[in-house]
Structure formats: C-alpha cells, structure tokens
Image (spheres, helix red, strand yellow):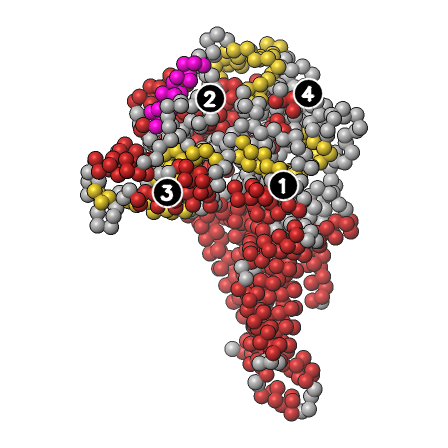
C-alpha cells in the first residue's frame, strides 16, 4: 500500500515536470536558404537576470533589457541610432511644422504584422488613443501632450501637440510601440495587464515567453528592413549574476544583458571573448531631502559636495571604468554639457563653508548647527553592492569634515517608500539622504531636466528632494516649450549651472557600460551610447544607417 | 483514537485560519507598494488619477478589512488571485513550480535520509572508533559549509573547469527535447543542485541517528539480545536500528513539511525554477497575491506534514496515544 502511494507520488511529480503540451510548430527550419544576408547566425543565447513577465507592452518589467526585448517584437515610428539621434523607422518621413506643434508622418508602405495583416495609419492612431486610455508609465506620459491625431491616408497621418515639444521624437515617436488595432481593440481596459498575445511588426516574433525559464524569439524573415542577422534569439533567465558569468565561460550562453562587473572585465578580454565598452548614461547621485533642516541650507549641501571625492569613487568602485560626474547633472560627454561646470573636490573649502555658517565641531567631532548635530541617515539599496560601498566611502569622506552619515541599507521597495512614496512627489518624503540614480533615457532627452527641478508636482515629477526655486521653474518652463535648438542648449546649460550651484543633489559618477560576449558566436554588436549593446540596432544593421 | 483524531483536525483548522490571516497581513505590513509593478517603468510620471485607477483595478484601493474579506471569499472558492508581476493566476504559477521544487528537494530528502541513517547507524554502532571520529569530523564540516559557497564552487569546478554538468536551469531551454532525451537532460540538470543540497543537509539526520544509536546501545534490551547470543548484525538491524529510528522519523517529518519551501539559495545559484526563489522575488517586488499564495502553500504543507506525523506516530510508537 505504502509503496503504491509513494510510486504514485513520484509518478505525479515526474509527470508534472514533463515537456509542456504540444509545442508550437513555428520552430525549427522556418528560415529557408533564401536569406541573402551574408553573415547570418542561426542561434544566439543571451542570459537575462530577471524575468520580463509575458513581455507585452503592458507587462514587461525593466527598461533594460525588457523594453529592448519588446522593441525586437514591436516597432516604433522612429528609432534612436547609436548616437541617440531619432531616425525614421515605421515612419519613412517625419515633417515638423514651423511652430513645432504639428508632425506630419508618412508610413513605410507594405509593412505587415506578424500575422500577415497590413499595418496602417489607423493602427498608429489606435495605439496613441489606447495608451492614453490605459495608463502605462513610459508610453502614456509622452503622449499626454498630443491634442489630435488625424489619419489622412492609410499611410499618412498628422499629429498636433498642445504645445511645441522638441522632445516629442525621442520621448514618443522613438519610444511608443505601435500595437495592432485588430487584436488590441477587443482588449478591455482592466484586462490589458493579463493580455498575453504578442503580435508586432518588428524584426522578431515572440514564439515562447516562459517567465520560469526563457524567452524565445524567431527572426521575422520578411521584416521591412530585411531579415535580422540572428535567426533565433533565446533569452534564458539566470537568476544569479555569478552563475550567469560562469555560463558565459562554459559556452552555455554567448552574452549577458547585465553589465560585466569591473573586476571581471579583464578576464573576458581574451580568447573567444570580447568586452564591448562605451559610456553609460545611468547616473549615481547623492539625493537630499531639501525640506529637512539643515539640508535646506545651501551651504550645507555645498560643503557635502566639496567633501566628496568623485574621482576616488570612480577609481575605487568602478576600477576607472566610469566617469566622475560634474555637479550639474548633465553627462560630460553630452552635447548639452556646459564645459564651465567643473568637477569639484576640496575638503578644506567644505570645512570653511561649515565654519562660515557657525557649524562648529562638538565633543564627538560632529559639527553642531543651531543646536543640532550634522548627523544624517544615508539610505541605499541593499541589492546593489557598488552603491553600498559608495555610501560607506562617502560616509568616511563626510566624517573628515565633521558630518556624520549613518549608512542604512534596505531593500529597494522600502527605500523607495521613504524617498519617493508611491512614486508621487506630491506625497512628500521621509528621509535625509539617499544614494539614488536615474536611468539612461533621462540623460538622452535633455527635456527631462524639467522633471528634475520644477517645483510644481505635476511637472517636476522626478523632483524627489522637494527642490523649490523660482529661477529653476522659469528656466524649466521655457525649456519645455522652446523648439529652437540653440535656445534649448542655452536654457539647458543655465539649468545645469543652477543645479551645480543650488545642489538639490550631489552628482557622483556615471558607470561605463561593459558587456562581455563570445565574439566567435556573434560579433555584430552595436553600442548605443549610454544604453549598451542589447538593442535592436545589434540585430538590424540598417536601423543604424 | 477518534477523539484524538478530531482534536488534531480541530487544531489543524485553527492553525490554518490564523496562518491565512497572517499571510494576508504580513506582506502589507512591509513598506512600499506594488504600484511599480502595476505602472511599470517610470511610474513617477503618471498622474494621480492614473495611479488611483491602477490601484482600483487591482482592488488595492479598498480598506484593508474589505480586501481581507474578499481574499477569504476568493480563497473559499479556491481562487488564489492573479500575480501582479507575472500576470498569471497564482495557482498556475505555483503548480508550474511545485513539481520542480518537489523533484529537487524530494530527491535531496531521500538521499539525505538514506545516507544520513545508514552512516549514522554504522558509525553509532562503532562509536569512539577511528571511523566514528573521522565521520563525525566530516559531517560537522559539511554542516558548517555555507550552501551558496559550495554551490558556486560546484558550478565553477564541475560545470566550467570540467564541463560535466550544466551551470543553470532545470532543463535545456534551447534544445526542444522529447521522450527519454528530455528526461536524461532533466536528470543531468538535477545532479549538481541535488548533490549540493544533500551535502549541506545530510548532517542533521546523521547526527540524530548517531546520537540515537548511541543511546539505544546502552539499553538493557540490547544487552539481553547480545546475551541471547545473537550476532552483531542481528542485534544492529533487528533491535538497535529499529528503535533508534524514532527520532530520525521526527527529523524526516519536519523536513517533509519544508519540502515545498524549496531551497532558496540552491535554487538561486543554479537558477532552478523552484518555489523558494519565487517567494523571495515576490517579497522583493511586493507581489501580494503571489506571496499570499506561496505562504498558503507552505503553511498547508507544514501543517499537513505535522498532522500526518501526529497520526503516524502512534503507529511507530504505541506509547504516544497512552500518554
């Protein structure tokens, strides 16, 4: 009897582990020998470290790599090239009206969805309406400024904006994935997040999305820009970073979307391996709560800025694979950077600034200002060892000038709940200082400076420190409506200078991107500045021309 | 006996209810909210109205007691809800992962029990000898090895340096295998995780068995058995081993309850699709429904294992019911 039960249990477990029911027929030798591409690679395995849910525009989870994987399946109207310049994609031509509010788009002809139906201007209009009706952070926000969309022919449409917005091509046209109307129109609001079918017009078809193990993409051989260079892309999920790099060594995967840690870069610089390197635009900074005394005093913030040696952080933490950040937020390699905004480090200056406002050292060495010690809690994500080390180094540097910063590492959601409750700056904040960072797209679109500094909670949606400055508001209001490029640059530089003086946060560094891969498996990678190599540019060379 | 049974079942129901309530409250007691899961990237750029709408659609805007009652109602109908991060029914996710967890931890539990019991019995029989001292040292060392370190070492040596085994996963995701080839592949992927898990957990059984054996050997009935002129083998297997097994049965039963909890560290290092790792991810992303479902599964299995062991114990040791 016992034996029967035991055997039954074993049989049940094994049965449940067996191959999933009838596998989709779309695999195998789908691509014939007709492909003219000279150096097509049959298959490539790229490890990702987290699952991306069902990988639809509403369910993917991370801007990198999830959104980039999504862009392999869905097209956008424009595409950012390696230099982050918007280039035509689904739209073969984009004409901007003289006042900067009208965009006349001509669509490429003969484009079809993966299910064979033609892609028309109606799909584009539908997509805009759909994202406005069903909120999805990164796609709804840039479309809010659209006043009307008029379809003039199956391959032409005209978009009118409420205000001129020079960021529109980058933030909207090159960002919003175009959805097939014939499939999504039956998906009702509340169900968008459960809808799993993924049919796009992009260079790849999603043939398997299993958040437990892997995503499998098959080349769309009839893609409008020609068949992509790799026929099959498999993205296995390897939860552990160390294991992922071991799998790269053993050849089980040929690339990893996660950046290669500085200490591993040299190991992967030889043999069949190569490391693609380039500037990274994701920033790391020290965020202040400007509503909390004495951090509301500019001199205190300036003293903290002078006390921190950013070059030393880059050397120690990043082994020089990075750029020390200048104080005005804008990356030193950005075309908008003002060369007059320079890197700062001067502990003596920090001390004299604090002396100047009467903050004298107390008995334990910590300075006291207006009867209160300059003692703060410094929050940091516990899942980010580099940032924890940064926090500890900074704590040591601040101690030198008489400021105590107690490092407190907590899980990311707990830190967010204190720094940015519900991701809504209108809800206030409850912290002293935090190691923070903004992703690469914030650096790519200079218009985002407005989000960082504007004091109106509806406009300054990333102003998490509660920074208030009439001058900043004035400049930001001009920047977000000015179309002229040279005026924009001047305004952006004024804001950069203002940030460098007022210091709502102290910029620390930009880590370089470094991505190890097996060059003998595939060497067609394109490094998109600030983003990395795991973008559609690496598989469709025509996008970068 | 019927009263004993009824009593136990009553306790089972009470514990389950309390656990379900705690399962509901605990995730919500953590700071943070699942809003970033609902809104995706750039949640900060949404308007207040859009945020409210997302929370409403997920039923998270209702007062806590309403959410609780709805949760209990759904539970009564057998509905575990939908995961916020995976966008799949929680029950489906659990069912998808449970077999892999059972395969991993179940295999390890069998190996642990068999190896631990035999080694403990043999060594306990010859306590104080060279073999005993050596084995005791070995198992104490194993006990103190950190699981993640041993797992990483196994990957580095047996999967990369000498590529005998795969480094990650429960099956080859690239090759679409069928039939015996599929099962060979699954077994191939299972070797390293199960070996490491067995190595780091075998000591408890071994030490229990050894201690138990040692104390049993001092009993008078063993002396009687020897005095009857039985051979060493007969004394060991017929008299000593059987009686010494009782504490080992307890340890095994406790382990049985933990079976579905999986082995988070091992699952992480080998990227094995088990329940343990899933729970960890659900906790860090504040995926309330998935967390609740996972906790429920854990609670039920632990309580159930206890219930079973309570019911089986009288059969193993008749003294229990009398007391």
Which chain hosts label 3?
Answer: A
Separation of disc 3 and disc 4 at Cα?
Answer: 51 Å
- Residue toward you, B106 or A283: A283
Task: Report the residue at 45% width, 42% height from top.
Answer: A317
Q: Earlier in the sequence, mark 2 or mark 1?
A: 1
**Do the residues at pointers 4 and 2 share their chain?**
yes
Residue position marked by numbered label 2 in the rendering:
A335
**Do the residues at pointers 3 and 4 share their chain?**
yes
Instruction: Please say whether residue A496 is one of the residues in the magenta stretch.
Output: yes
Separation of disc 3 and disc 2 at Cα?
Answer: 29 Å
Separation of disc 2 and disc 1 at Cα?
Answer: 34 Å
Residue range of the region highlighted in magenta in the rendering = A485-500
Give the numbered dot on residue A224.
4
Residue A46 point in image, percent of width and height: 64, 38
Separation of disc 1 and disc 4 at Cα?
Answer: 37 Å
Give the numbered dot on residue A394.
3
Q: Earlier in the sequence, mark 3 or mark 4?
A: 4
Residue position marked by numbered label 1 in the rendering:
A270
**Do the residues at pointers 3 and 2 share their chain?**
yes
Given this view, does label 3 or label 4 mark the residue nearer the observer?
3
Mark 2 element type: loop
10 Å neighbourhood of mark 1: few (<14), some, or many (≥20)? few
Mark 4 element type: loop
């Amino acid at each position: 009897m016992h034996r029967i039960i035991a055997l039954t249990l074993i049989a049940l477990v094994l049965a449940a582990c067996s191959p999933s029911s009838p596998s989709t027929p779309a695999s195998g030798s789908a691509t014939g020998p007709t492909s003219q591409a000279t150096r097509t690679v049959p298959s490539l395995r790229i490890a990702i470290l987290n699952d991306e849910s069902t990988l639809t525009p509403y369910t993917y989870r991370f801007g990198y790599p999830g959104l980039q994987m999504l862009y392999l399946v869905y097209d956008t109207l424009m595409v950012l090239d390696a230099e982050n310049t918007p280039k035509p994609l689904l739209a073969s031509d984009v004409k901007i009206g003289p006042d900067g509010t009208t965009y006349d788009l001509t669509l490429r002809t003969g484009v079809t969805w993966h299910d064979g139906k033609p892609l028309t201007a109606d799909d584009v209009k539908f997509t805009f309406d759909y994202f406005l009706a069903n909120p999805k952070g990164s796609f709804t926000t840039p479309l809010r400024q659209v006043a009307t969309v008029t379809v003039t022919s199956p391959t032409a449409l005209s978009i009118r904006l409420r205000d001129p917005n020079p960021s529109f091509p980058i933030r909207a046209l090159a960002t919003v994935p175009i959805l097939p109307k014939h499939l999504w129109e039956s998906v009702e609001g509340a169900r968008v997040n459960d809808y799993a079918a993924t049919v796009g017009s992009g260079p790849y078809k999603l043939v398997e999305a299993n958040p437990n193990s892997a995503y499998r993409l098959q080349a769309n051989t009839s893609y409008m820009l020609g068949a992509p260079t790799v026929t099959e892309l498999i993205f296995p999920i390897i939860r552990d970073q160390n294991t992922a790099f071991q799998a790269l060594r053993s050849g089980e995967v040929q690339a990893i979307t996660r950046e290669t840690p500085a200490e591993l870069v040299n190991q992967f610089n030889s043999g069949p391996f190569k490391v693609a390197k380039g500037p990274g635009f994701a920033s790391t900074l020290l965020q202040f709560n400007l509503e909390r005394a004495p951090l509301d005093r500019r001199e205190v913030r300036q003293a903290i800025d002078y006390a921190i040696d950013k070059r030393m952080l880059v050397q120690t933490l990043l082994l020089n694979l990075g750029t020390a950040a200048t104080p005005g937020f804008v990356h030193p390699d950005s075309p908008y950077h003002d060369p007059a905004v320079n890197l700062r480090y001067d502990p003596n200056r920090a001390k004299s600034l604090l002396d100047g406002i009467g903050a004298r050292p107390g008995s334990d060495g910590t300075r006291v200002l207006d009867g209160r010690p300059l003692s703060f809690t410094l929050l940091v994500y516990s899942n980010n060892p580099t940032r924890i080390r940064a926090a500890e180094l900074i704590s040591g540097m601040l101690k030198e000038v008489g400021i105590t910063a107690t490092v407190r590492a907590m899980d990311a959601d707990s830190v967010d709940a204190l720094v940015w409750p519900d991701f809504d700056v209108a809800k206030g904040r409850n912290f002293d200082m935090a190691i923070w960072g903004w992703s690469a797209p914030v650096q790519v679109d200079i218009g985002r400076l407005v989000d960082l500094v504007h004091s109106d909670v509806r406009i300054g949606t990333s102003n998490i420190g509660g920074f208030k400055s009439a001058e900043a508001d004035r400049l930001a209001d001009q920047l977000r409506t000015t179309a002229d490029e040279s005026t924009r640059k001047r305004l952006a530089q004024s804001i950069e200078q203002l940030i460098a003086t007022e210091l709502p946060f102290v910029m620390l560094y930009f880590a370089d991107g470094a991505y190890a891969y097996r060059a003998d498996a595939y060497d067609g990678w394109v490094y998109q500045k600030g983003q990395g190599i795991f973008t559609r540019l690496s598989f469709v060379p025509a996008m970068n021309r | 006996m019927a009263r004993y049974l009824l009593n136990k079942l009553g306790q089972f129901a009470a514990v389950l209810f309390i656990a379900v309530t705690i399962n509901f409250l605990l995730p919500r007691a953590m700071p943070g909210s699942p809003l970033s899961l609902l809104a995706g990237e750039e949640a900060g750029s949404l308007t207040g109205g859009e945020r409210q709408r997302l929370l409403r659609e997920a039923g998270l805007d209702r007062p806590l007691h309403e959410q609780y009652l709805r949760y209990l109602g759904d539970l009564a109908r057998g509905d575990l809800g939908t995961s916020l991060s995976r966008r799949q029914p929680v029950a489906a996710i659990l069912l998808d992962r449970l077999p892999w967890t059972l395969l991993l931890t179940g295999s390890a539990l069998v190996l642990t029990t068999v190896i631990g019991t035999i080694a403990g019995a043999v060594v306990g029989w010859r306590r104080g000898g060279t073999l005993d001292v050596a084995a005791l040292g070995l198992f104490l060392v194993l006990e103190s090895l950190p699981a993640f370190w041993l797992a990483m070492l196994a990957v580095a040596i047996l999967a990369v340096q000498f590529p005998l085994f795969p480094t990650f996963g429960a099956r080859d995701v690239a090759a679409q295998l069928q039939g015996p080839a599929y099962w060979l592949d699954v077994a191939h992927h299972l070797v390293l995780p199960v070996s490491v898990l067995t190595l780091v957990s075998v000591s408890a059984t071994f030490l229990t068995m050894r201690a138990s054996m040692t104390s049993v050997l001092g009993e008078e009935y063993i002396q009687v058995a020897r005095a009857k002129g039985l051979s060493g083998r007969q004394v060991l297997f017929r008299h000593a081993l059987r009686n010494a097994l009782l504490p080992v049965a307890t340890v095994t039963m406790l382990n049985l309850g933990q079976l579905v909890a999986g082995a988070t560290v091992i699952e992480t290092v080998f990227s094995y699709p088990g329940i343990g790792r899933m729970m960890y991810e659900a906790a860090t992303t504040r995926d309330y429904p998935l967390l609740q479902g996972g906790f429920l599964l854990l609670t039920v299995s632990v309580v159930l294992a206890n219930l079973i062991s309570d019911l089986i114990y009288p059969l193993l040791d008749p003294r229990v019911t009398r007391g």
